[in-house]
Amino acid sequence: MSEDLWAPHALSDPERFTPDVLDPAGPLAPLDSPESAEAPAHGSVTLIIPTFNEAGNIGELLSLLADSLPAHLPCEVLFVDDSTDDTPAVIEKAALDLPFPVAVLHRESAVGGLGGAVVEGVKRADTDWIVVMDADLQHPPHLVPELVGEGERTGADLVVASRYIPGGSRAGLAGNYRIAVSRGATWLTKGLFPRALRGISDPMSGFFAMRRQVVTADALKPLGYKILLELAVRCRPAKVAEVPFVFQDRYSGESKSGAREGMRFLAHLAALRSATPLARMIGFGLIGLSGFVPNLVALWLLTQAGMHYLPAEIAANQAGVLWNFVLIETLLFRDRRRHRHWADRVGRFAVLANADLLLRIPLIALFVGRFGMEVLPATALALLTTFVLRFAATEALVYLPRTTRTRTARPTRS
């Protein structure tokens, strides 16, 4: 991933940065570099704003932030930019006369979408607080100090700007369709993660403040734009507070949400929900059951076409194998796919899935002949045994990282 990080002017403490940062064209040292070893000011804030083609919003956003941020609040603004337009140049021009420091991290590859952009910002933040907001002015800038102030007053680790508590409103959501989708997504996430989202009425909010010390950036695996959900589930803040806000109309440009983001959201939910071994095993079993549908459809089509039922059984089984592989890749092991080439994963998965058939029949014969079991219970036990073995083998042989062996040099004879 290629990145370009610059600062229009130095932060209030120039010792934290390399000398050439005083030049607007110079590179900004990462916020977690050795130059940032000094403890941050109490109540200091890094405001992370992910951007994708938001040039029309930047000037108004920075102007409102300049009016909203009190002089006593040590705040720095970090735009993490995935734009293909002139947004970085617009930020540079608009940031020249501001009372707070502004920096831009431009990513050539938008890994993880909006959530990935926020995580990149988190890795560079060394302040007490991190505030995340959108650039389109649907999140009112005047609430930034209120979010941090609420956290300081209550001792909360996470403060969420919520549309669903008294004083809040989703007025800026255009149309009944978007309102229904937002509400449905909220119910779904709270139903899937009741403990992690306790005290959070608006888990779909993209406007929140979080203490930097409770965020483990390396544990985050964002997918799409619902970064609050990722942070709440994986970091588990001990205490949560909320501040009401009115969701505003977009100031300029068009919404980036759509069907593609919806699918990424569902995949993200599945990845979060299947993070534990037990949850993955349950998901593995449910996907395996769903694989009977394409298996039976393929079997019917092949036998209707005149193929003998035995080779048709073998061929149809591959349809179920392919179905299971696609769902398991997408829903259970998405974050582990990089460990092996896709062809290697397909081959290993197909071998294990078909080996299940070869193992199941001898097991049934063993249970019936050796232990005197009836055929039906023997078959059920064999199915359960091969299922557990196939799940363990799939996780270990297909999706776990390769182990690198180090050779020990033999001592030379003198």
Image: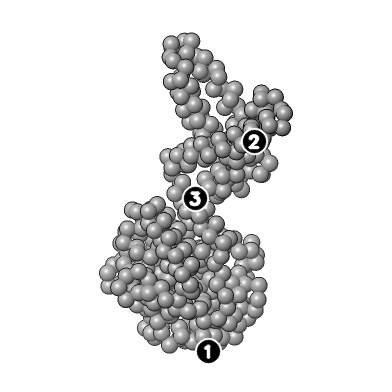
- Please say if the residues under marks 1 and 2 sit with CB atoms less than 8 Å apart: no
Compute the Cα span from label 1 to label 2. Answer: 67 Å
User: Residue 332's x, y, as percent?
Assistant: 52, 45
SS state under label 1? loop
Name the mark nearer the viewer: 1 or 3: 3
The number of discs equals 3
Name the mark nearer the viewer: 3 or 2: 2
Choose the circle earlier in sequence order: 3 or 2: 3
SS state under label 2? helix
Choose the circle earlier in sequence order: 1 or 3: 1
At label 1, which amino acid type do we have? Asp
Q: Residue furthest left?
A: 154
* Residue at point 45%, 83% (across, down): 65
Q: Residue furthest front?
A: 304
**Mark 1 nearby-residue class (10 Å; few <14, some 14–19, many ≥20):** few
* Residue at point 49%, 50% (across, down): 271
Compute the Cα span from label 3 to label 2. Answer: 29 Å
* Residue at point 35%, 77% (across, down): 146
At label 2, which amino acid type do we have? Ala
The residue that disc 1 covers is 97
Q: Is residue 258 visible?
A: yes
- Please say if the residues under marks 3 and 2 sit with CB atoms less than 8 Å apart: no
User: Residue 338's x, y, as percent?
Assistant: 61, 48
The residue that disc 2 covers is 298
Compute the Cα span from label 1 to label 3. Answer: 44 Å
* Residue at point 71%, 28% (across, down): 307
**Mark 3 nearby-residue class (10 Å; few <14, some 14–19, many ≥20):** many
Choose the circle earlier in sequence order: 1 or 2: 1
Please give the label number shown on residue 271: 3
At label 3, which amino acid type do we have? Ala
